[in-house]
Structure formats: structure tokens, C-alpha cells
Image (cartoon, grey):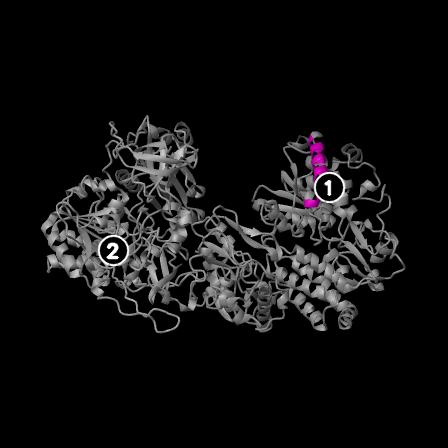
Amino acid sequence: MSKYPAGENNSYILLRQRAIPDLDNLDIYRQHGGFTVLEKAITSMKPDEVIEVVKGSGLRGRGGAGFPTGLKWSFIDKDNWPHYVVANADESEPGTFKDREIMEGNPYQFLEGIAICAYAIQSSAAYIYLRGEFWQISANLDRHIEALGVAGLLGDNLFGSDYSLHIYTHLGAGAYICGEETALLESMGGKLGQPRLRPPFPPSFGLFGKPTVVNNVETLTNVPPIVERGAEWYRTMGTEKSSGPKIFSLSGRVSRPGNYELPLGTTFRELIYEHGGGIPNGRSIKAIMAAGASSALIVANDEALDTPMDYESVPALGAQLGSASVIVIDDSISIPWLINKTTHFFKHESCGKCTPCREGTYWMMHLTDRIANANATQEDVALLHAVASQIRGKCLCALGEFSIEPVLSGIERFKADFDTAVSETNNN
Amino acid sequence: MTKLVTLTIDGMQVSVPEGTLVVDAAKKIGIEIPVFCYHPKMEPVGMCRMCLVEIGRPVIDRSTGQPVLEDDGSPKIQFSPNLETACTTPVGAGMVVLGATEKARSGREDIIEFLLTSHPLDCPICDKGGECPLQNLTIKYGSGQSRYLYDEKKHFVKHVSLGELIFLDRERCIQCGRCVRFQSEIVDDPVIGFFHRGRALEIVTYSNPGFDSYFSGNTTDICPVGALTTADFRFGARPWELNKAASICNHCPVGCNLTMNVRREAASGGDWVVKRVMPRQNESVNEIWVCDKGRFGYHFAASSSNDQTSFKRLSQPLVRKNAGSDHPGELVPASWDEALSVVSERFAEAGDGLLALAGGRLANEDLFNLKQLTTTLGGEAVLYTHMAGGELTTQLGIQPGSDIGTMGQGDAILVVACDLMEEAPIWWLRVKQAAERGSQLIILNSRSTKLDQAAAFVLRYPFGAETSAVLAMLNALSEKRLRLPEAVQVLERDPTLQAAAEVFSGANNALIMYGSDCIGLTESQALAQACANLLDATGHVGRPNNGLLGVWPRANDQGAWELGFQTQTKLEDALGAAAALYIVAADPAGDDPTYLGQSGFGGKAFVVVQDLYLTQTARLADVVLPAQSWIERDGSFTSGERRAQRFYPVIPPRTAPVSRAESPSTNKAPLLIAGDEVMESPLPDFAITAMITLRIDSEARITASSAARVFNQMAETVPAFSDQTYLELAQVHEQWPIVGRDDLYYGGTSYENTGGLGMQLALNTSDTPSTTRLAGTTVEFIRMPKLGQIAFPIARLYDRGKTLMPSQLLHERIGEPYIVLNVNDAEMLRIQDGDVVHMTVANREPDSPDRVTTGQTVVVQARLDQELPERVVLVPRSFGIPIDKPTPVEIRRTE
């Protein structure tokens, strides 16, 4: 289960630079089959055929929501033109650092994925929205895009067809909320980065109000191998409903943190102990955050460790897989301290558009400040739980809804830590 | 026909058009779903989350497409696990909305609690207190207890100036974005926006001056908290202390419906004082909006004879006495009896030598009685204006049933020689919205205006060629073509003009709005005629939403046209020739001293001035009669859309100076004691005129007793008013959206209309429209001189007129007198932007070859403009510069 199918030349589909040196050089990338898939798509496939292949592969969005990618592409409104592709490279979830490695090491596969997606929805302009801190990556991507233009792999009348495509990079200003696709689109349109009301969804009303596919970097990087080798091949990896490889960003109290490209459905135990080398300093594992700061805290018992990391099994633990940024918490960590960190983050990043998130994260920050600093009572813990609960289900976008996940799960699943924090208050 | 959708809200069934939002559907049947960010005039944003409801939808069997039924045969309803926002959810067939459940109630309580964690709760010092949606909804839905630690509250600056008109209290702001959305979505003036994020989110202004929009005051009405307040009302009064009275704005021909809030104040000697002006809903006129001139420009009418500024009101009649051959004598206070005796005697002597000159801010009743007086004596009734063509609007104007708010797809609006934003901002808004709904907007102008952005066709004619430009459109549609001056032949051949003409001709309904941008009396008469011909030729007459609409300089010019007032092209000659002058609500001497001629109105005329103030003209008069302002009495105005609308007494008439008695109380509030005899105080214009007339002819059919009686007499005599009664003007019907009442959270603090929606006048069909007058005639055209400049008058909303200058709040926006010059001309004249220049009026006849530079000289600031053609100078009207039509001028730099 945890290995790619036999017969592969190497074990990497996404992080291929780990096996092939200098893959960020266009010549090297082309020597390894680069842009033959795009050529194949443009010269021998109809756009809808490309969509069908992606649909058939079962590829799901790697940004966190896990929405079927091919289905998203098929929603593009064909009565409204032009169409756009926007690659979401705003990678901002604490603990997520996979898109960065793709763009740094295997940028051409990502760009080829954008191009195939653009062809599939007949878009002639694609944008890469990068978080502001990725200015160096952005500059490198600009060079790569230029190289593609020089090589005739990007631009007008590609491969002798009448299909043309231009790709542009766009740097954000570093707001977490701009990773939310509609806030991203607002930001790209020159407006304040705040999420839009949905519906309408981007496939009918996206960038500049036009039909748009917004996909995560990793999602798009999956596309060339899928179109090259077919949906059937792709489905041999991962689970039935969560097919394909996934890059797990492993961090926290683990011996070998880093990105691990493994099939979906790999267990937490395999990731943390086999690949990550287990917990250092003789400590034992206490909790897992599987989706970065937006995670519900998973109690790291045997049942949890043996749970496959896919879009169905993790929710069964009362948590989410999200973008698979697995943060390992050991027994030296106080959960009140931890949720104080996450709450500060969400308070700082709340865009302010809707009331429960704007006011609720601020209130939770004050409460967790006092609890974490041993200046609180049981009433404060109960109030924190109540405040988090009353945010739930009332927010305009997912940011506010995610902000309460560590808080509620922390209080409910690690009550002893809160009792300790409160008792320290009494000792003060 | 829109498809209706039936749903159930809190057990009540309602059928509403498809696409209606749940929140509006509930409002229609009187169910309250509380909101802060939602506003029925704007697109929903779902930000505040206050409108949470439970929503259930019928379960549909996918295989059959039929609703799944419960055991009892009722449709199975599935409720979503989360509460949903009623403001963003369109109705669906069979939908079940529950707003009164414990779940919904607790959801709203949660949102209120969140909002209050960052709200200062400073209601006792907040202007909104008493009419505050947040306050009201907190009492209704809040828990009544605070779980938030007070010392964890975040504090912000409480007095942020968004310019000198609007102030922001950052602590009170709940970030609903209504103001920001109003400015961008409704009035297309995106000069404010959100800055920062999260709790630091704040409203900022991008413009200089701050919040540079003629509609800014409306944001304070729709602000659901006390975050935005006007500098005019701020800290001025509490809402519950205020009385209200329905009124009509007196600044422009739109006729916005207003509610004026008043209270008695010790500081004013116990007098009633206007504290603020608010919009009153009339969806066919101003909806629920009003421009800032209307909102902030009421002080001229509210000032009193106690006013220590130059806007001191007249309090009693003045009669000139002790005049001798070598000295003019002086104006001394007199009783009404004495003044009226003198006036009536001298008017009777003058007979048909009487000339009544009336300003367009007078009410219908005043104008009617003036007309009765001149008819009695055989004299002349002249409207004091720079814009003619009104008689054509009474014949070919718009008729009952017209409403720009109903114009859309398939309709066309032609705006010519007009800067609507400056001349009538609410019409600008209404026309822009008609264009957004699909009306084809055609703009014909000599220069760019803000309305261009909304137009389908923007056409430019050379300065002075407005009439030819309209005729070029007519030529585009007809076989028999009028020969037009060379200068417009480029425009005539422009395919855009051809296309625009065809669109106009083919429109289901078409209006022409013409103004007086860069033109005067003679030119506007010709322009109106050309417009009338175009309407007639294309069949856009005699039907609702079709016809000619004048964008007049004054609020009731339309009323004057309906009542048969004429214009005088050579006004100074007419004034000089009259035996007696009755100048009412006009100040020709103050506007342009050349009206006085060599010896002051001919030197021998008996001059009576009836006004609010001792104007320049009044200082020269033989008798001065003090009039009440429109807010001190009742009456009616006729808007440019030919809608007669009633205004009501807002404050009691000003009495003569009240003698003060020392108050026995320690706080020294003056005692209110009765003033002088009421008869020595100002009176309504119609009453004064009637009393004069009755003294001349006791049998005259004229009444001084009440505006209602004058109006009904008018209805008997004047065909346009024949379908109307004073009472019917006060009728109202249900309007959407519902505003006012207890629904402040929904539409804002705009007032519900209980004072009357007015009635549109019938077209005058007794006179045959003279639409063919232009055929075969040569078209006048102003040629640019080889040397020197021609000054063209333009309108500025904020001008230095006598009805605006008393509003000191607006002085910064009004600014000093200026002219606009072309950059090349300026370079030649060694003038730089901002320089002070001398401008000399060269001659009052633009085509006269022998120009004599003996005119007046004004000292003004020069502004430079790159787009302006050479030799063209723009001069704002009512800035103390005597230019009311295209006029040759000479400009030199002030050394």
C-alpha cells in the first residue's frame, strides 16, 4: 500500500528533482519527457478528453478541501469567455511547505500542469498567485516562463495549433486569507483580500468575474503524469476514493521533518516513525495536527497512528487531512500553550469581513492568553469553549471555522492540560 | 411576467418573484429578520451574519424529479445543519424558513455578543442613540449580559475626520461595509474603502478633499451604528428630542422629498431650530437618497433676523423715506399697512408698466398670485433665469406616469448641454441607474462630464454648437436635411452620431434632458426647440417616459413655465423701461450690476423687492417686503419631472426681534416672550402679492388666506393643474423597500413618506406645439474670436449663491471664485495654475464685431485645463462673476 506500483523507474512522481539533478533546467526536464504530454494533449486530444482523463484519475484538490479536480474543470461555464487558470501558490498554512519545494525543484512539471489545465478549459491566460514571501520563487518562475517562451513551449500557436497560452506570476502581500480561492481572486483583481460570497463559484464567476479554475500547485503538478500515463495507472496508487500520491509535510517533534511523497492512505505511523524517524529525545507522541494550524487535535493513540491518511479515514477520527501538513506534538507540549499559538495566528490573519471570525478570534486570543499564562479559571476554559462553539457554523469562509478546530478539540480531548493550567492560576 | 415562488416563513406562506432574497420576502409579509450589513438597495454580502435563520428545502427524489412525501402526504423537508444567512439566500419553491426558533434566536444572540465585544457601548453620547439599529437589535436579541472582560476591549480613535463633512468613530464601526458599498455600488464614487484587516479593519478616504462625493451624507443614514456622523448634526441633538416635518428640497429641479428635524432651543431664545435635513422616501423622485447640497444647504431658510452674520433675515417691511433731489433717502421700518398702501398705489399708477420679476425658488402659489397681479394690471410676469425653453416642456414634456426609475432595456435618454452631476446630482444617479438597467444613454456635450462613464454614446460638439449638434441627430434620421454650420459637420458625419440617432429613434421610450452647460437664455431657447423637434420627429412625445425635461437652475422654474411666465432676453432694457418693478426672490443687482443700467433700473421706476434678505437689489428699492422662507409656511413646488409636491411648515414664521427678558433661573436661559404683532413679521409671498392685488382691485380673484386655497384656485384656472387638488398631493401609497417606521435596521434612517408623493401635471394641449419653428431657419452658432477668449458659464453644485453661502460647513468645498483656462492660452498670457487674474467682460454681445472692453472686471483664480479648446474659458455660475451666457472676455495676469 505504501509504495508506488512496481516497475517504476523511480519512486517520485511529484518531487522528481530528488532523483533527477538539475530538473529546474528546461533541457534536463525535456530530456526526461518534459512537455511531451502538453504536446500530446494539444495535438492529439480534445479539451474535454483531457478533462475526462483527469476526472477518471480521481485526482482531488491538494490544497486542503479535496474537491475532485476533473469535476471542477468540467464546471467551467462555456457560455462565458474568456476563461482563466489560477494556480494557488499562496501556501500559507502553518506546517505546509510542499508547494515551495515543487516550485523550487520541479517547476517545469508544475508549469506544464498549468498549461494542460489551461488547454483543457481553453484558457489562454494563466496566473500563478504566490504569497509575498515567495518573491525569489516568483522571480525564478518568471525566468522559467521566459525560457518556455524562447523554447516555443509557451506563447502563441503552440505546437502548430491555434491554441495560445501565456502564464503570469502575481505576488500577493502575504495574507493567509488570500489562500482562500475567492479572496485570492479579489486580491488578484486589485481589491482587498477578502473572501467572496459563494455561490457563485469561480468556475462561473472567477478572476475578473470570468470563469476560472483555481487549483493548488501540487494538484496541477499531478496533471502531466496523469495525462501521460492515464487514469487507470493513477488509480493504482492511494485508496479507492483518495487516489494518487501526496506530499506530506512533516514537522513538529519528529526526528526527520520534511516533505514525504507517499501514496494517499499511508498511515500516520508509517509517516512519523518509518519515514520521520519517530519522536526525538525519548519523548512519546501526544497529539497530531494533520492539517496544520487548521487541524483538530488528534489524540495520538494506536488507533489513530494506524489510521490511513486519506480524505475519508482522517475525518473518522474527528479531524481533517487538509493539505496534509502533519505536525507532531509530543508529551512536553501543553495544549493550552499550543492553542494559544494557533489562536494568535488566526486572530492575526482574520480578514475582518464577517463578525464571528473577526470578533471571535480576538476574544479567543484573550482567553487563551490568560489560560496559557496561568491567569485563568475553569470559567474561562468553559467560556473559551462556548465562544469557539458559537463561532462554529456562522462564518463566511473556512478561516473562522478552522480557527476553532484546535481549540474545541484541545479542550475536549486534552482536558487534563487545561485543569493543570487552571490549577497553576490558583498557585499563583 | 416574473415567475412567482411560494415559500413559508415562520408559518406564513408568501409568493414572491423568483430571485427574491429570503430577507426581503420576510420583510414583505412583516416578519423581521434582523440585518446590519444587508441593505435592500445594495447587493448582499453576508458579512455581519445577523440574519441567521434555519432553512429547510423540499427533498427531491433524483430518479423521478418529484418531491419526496412524508407519511401524511406533506413534502419532506430537509434542514441544513448550519444556520444560513437570509440576506444571501434566494427563495426556493417549497422552502421553509424558520426565524423564530431557539436555534435562530441563539445564533443572533451570538452575533450580537460578538459585535458588542468591540463596540464601545457609548450610547449616551452617541448621535445614533435612539435611532440605532445596533441599539435596537441588542435590546431585542442580545443577552443583556456581558461575558467579555471590559479591560480586554480594543480602543480606537473616536474622531476621525473623513473630510470636514463626515466623521468616523472607529470604535463604533461594525465593519458592515454599507458606506463603502454605497459609494462604489450606488453612486460610483469609490472614495472610501476598507484598510487593514481583522479587527484593525478601518474605513479610510482616498480622496482629497476627504470623502469627496456629493452623496456622502447618505452613508450616515445607512450606517447601522453611530460610526459615521455628519459634521452638521454631530453632537447637535438627540433623535427623540426632534420633531419632524415633510419638506421638499429647494436647491434644484429634482424636488427631493425631505424630512426636516427641528427642536426648540434655549440658545436660540426658545425658537424652533432646524437640526438636520433627512431624505424622505419617494421612489419616483429621490428614492431614499439626497445630495449633500440638499442635506447641508438649509441654513439660508433657517436663519433669523437675530442672525449676526450677513445672512440676517428681513423682519419687517421697509419704506424709503426722506428722499430728496440730491440724496436717495433711507429705508426705514414701516407697518405692513403703510408699505402695502404705498406699493398698491404705485403699482396701480404703473398699470401695464408693471414688471414682476420672479425667482424660481418661489412656490407654485406665489408664482400663481404674481401672475394674477400682472394679469389684473396688464403688466408682465418674467422669470429670472438664464435658461429658456420651458413652454416646450409644458407641451412636449413628460407626463403623468413617468418615472426614470422605471426606464431600462429598450429605452433611451439623451442628455445634452448638461453636467447632471453638478446641476442635479440625484438625476445623475437616476439616469446612471437607468443606463445600468439597460437604457441607452446618449450624451451630447461640449466637454466631458462624470455621466460620460455610464453612457453608451458620448458625442462632443464644438463649444457653442449645441443646437446644431441636436439638429445633426435629426438630420441623421431625416431625408430633408437642415444645413448646419461647418464646425459641426465633422460631428454630423460621425458614425457614432448616426448610431446614437438610430438608437434614440428606435427606443421604446426616450427622454431628452437638456441643461444650460455653457449656454445662456438665447442659446437654450434654440436648443430646447431643436430637442422638441427631435422628440416630435421620432414620436417620443405624449407618452409616459417620453418627452423634454429641462434641467433648470432653480427648484420651481418648471412651476413658473406651467403658470405662463416668460423670459426676457434683454432684461436690463425691460427693467429700465418699466414704470414699476416687483422683484421677488431675485437679486439682479447683486448678480450683475449692469442690470441697473446707467441710473439704476432706468432711474424712474418704482422698485419693490420682496425677499428673505436685504439684497443688493433690495438696498436700492423704494419698498422692501419681508417674505417667509419655504420652511416657515406650506405650499407646493413643481419638479423638473412636472411633479407637483407639497411642502409643510417646518418651523413657525420668524417674528420680529424678540425682546429678551432676564431669566429668573440660574442657568440664564432666556424667557420666550411673545414677539411683536404678527402682521409686522414676514409673510408668505403669495399672501403679500394677494394683499397688494386686493388693495388695487378688491374684486380680484386672488386669495391671501392659505396656500391650499391658492392651489385650488390654480387648479381651476391652469389646465396643467386641473387634475389636481392640494389634498391629493398629500396622498401616499406603499413603497418598496419599506423604510422608516421601526425598520431602521433595514433601510436606514431615511424617513417614511407620510406627507405625500405628489402628482405629475397633465400636458398642456391647449397650445399647439411649435415644433416646426426651426425648419428652414439658419442655425445660430457662436464663432470663436480670432483674439481674446469667450467665457462659457458652467454649473457647480457648490456655488457662492445666496441660498448656499449661509451654510458655512460647505465653504471649504465651495472655494473661491475661479475660472478655467486652456493651458496654451495660459502660456501665452503668462498665467500659471493658481495665479490670480483679472477678467474683463468685453461686451455682452458675442457676435458684435466692434467689441468695446468697457465691461466689469473681476479678480479670480485661474485653473488650467489641458482638454479645453483654445480661447474657451469656463466660468462657474453663482460665483460672483457676471457671466450667464457665452461672453467675450479679456484676461490678464494680475501683476
Which region is colored magenta?
Answer: A130-149
Q: Horizontal and vertical percent for residue A250?
A: 81, 53
Q: Are marks 2 and 1 on the same chain?
A: no
Quadrant of the rendering where the C terminus of chain A is positioned: bottom right
Please rate how many residues cluster around mark 2, counting C-alpha atoms within 10 Å: few if below 14, some from 14 to 19, many from 20.
many
Q: In which quarter of the view is residue B244 placed?
A: bottom left
- Could you tell me the amino acid type at mark 1? Phe
Q: Horizontal and vertical percent for residue B48?
A: 56, 61
Query: Which SS class for mark 2?
Result: helix
- Could you tell me the amino acid type at mark 2? Asn
The answer to whether A404 is drawn above or below residue B602 in the figure is below
Label 2, label 1: how far apart the Cα atoms are: 75 Å
The answer to whether residue A147 is magenta is yes
Q: Main secondary structure of the magenta part?
A: helix
In this picture, residue B78 sits left or right of residue B214: right
Q: Nearer the viewer, residue B227 or B568?
A: B227
Q: Which residue is mark 1?
A: A110
Query: Which SS class for mark 1?
Result: helix
Could you say which disc has been placed on residue B168 in the image?
none
Q: In which quarter of the view is residue B289 placed?
A: bottom left
Q: Nearer the viewer, residue B760 or B411?
A: B760
Please rate how many residues cluster around mark 1, counting C-alpha atoms within 10 Å: few if below 14, some from 14 to 19, many from 20.
many
Could you say which disc has been placed on residue B364 in the image?
2
- Which residue is situated farthest in the left direction here? B349
Residue B411 visible in the shown view: no
In this picture, residue A371 sits left or right of residue B808: right
User: Are the residues tagged 2 and 1 within 8 Å (C-beta)?
Assistant: no
The answer to whether residue B636 is magenta is no
